[in-house]
Image: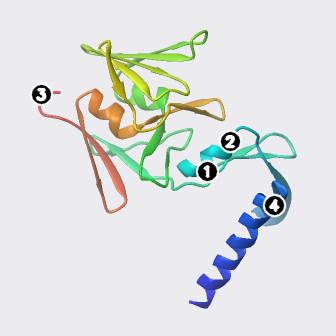
Amino acid sequence: MMKFVFLKRILFVAIFAVVCTGSIAYAVQDDGKSVTKETVLQSGYSQEMDNGIIIYKDSGGGTVIHFPYVPKIKLNGQEIKFTKEPFTLIDGITLVPAREFFEKLGATVNWHNDSQTITVEKGSTTVELTIGSKVAKINKKIAELPVNVRLVDNCTYIPLRFISEAFGYKVDYKDGVITVDAAQGN
């Protein structure tokens, strides 16, 4: 109990420092050596805190750090390993790196830089997503995503459940593991 109170105080001080000064110092261990850096809140991300993502730009070179929960995800019984980590927002929505996830589903992914749009095709289903938008097109029909498609550290993130279900997969959460399974006939 004492350890929890101590950690709460440290967290309060850290949040207070960020809110009041816009920056915070932190220390991490790198191969047993303590590394201390100062972070600066990246402009344009103040609203992101409401969605459970806190993004800082490292004053030493531009590293992006996010602190939400990193979920374990299984696709058809096999744990998925991502090169860019998925994350879960405070409101329980899990976001995954778009290209990696779609390719693991066996879909074809096309990026349209001019419109900041992703087009994904698998079987008879086509999904179109745009960075910064909650609107998706599934076989040319408009659907609303629970959160915006977002770009974090040059990677497009999409809501896992919505996208999986758009392609006919069943999504379940149990004991800290998200399972994505092919539905009957898929």
Name the residue type under label 4: Cys
Measured as percent of width and height from the top left, residue 180 is found at 29, 41
14 relative to 108, above or below: below
- The answer to the question of whether label 1 and label 3 lie on touching residues, with beta carbons closer than 8 A, is no
* SS assignment at label 4: helix
Q: Would residue 1 be found to the left or right of residue 38 on screen? A: left
Using the image, tell me which numbered label, if any, was put on residue 20.
4
- The answer to the question of whether label 4 and label 1 lie on touching residues, with beta carbons closer than 8 A, is no
* SS assignment at label 3: loop
State the residue at coordinates (63%, 49%).
Answer: 66
Which one is earlier in the sequence, the residue at label 4 or at label 1?
4
- Give neighbour class at mark 1: few <14, some 14-19, many 20+ (Cα, 10 Å): few
Which one is earlier in the sequence, the residue at label 3 or at label 2?
2
Name the residue type under label 1: Met
Q: Would residue 138 be found to the left or right of residue 58 on screen? A: left
- The answer to the question of whether label 3 and label 2 lie on touching residues, with beta carbons closer than 8 A, is no
- Give neighbour class at mark 4: few <14, some 14-19, many 20+ (Cα, 10 Å): few
State the residue at coordinates (37%, 29%).
Answer: 144
**Viewer-nearest residue: 145 or 31:** 145
- Mark 1 and mark 3: Cα distance apart in space: 40 Å
Report the residue that reaches farthest toward the left. 185
Name the residue type under label 3: Gly
Question: Which mark is in front, 3 or 2?
Answer: 2
- Give neighbour class at mark 3: few <14, some 14-19, many 20+ (Cα, 10 Å): few
Residue matched to label 2: 45
Residue matched to label 1: 49
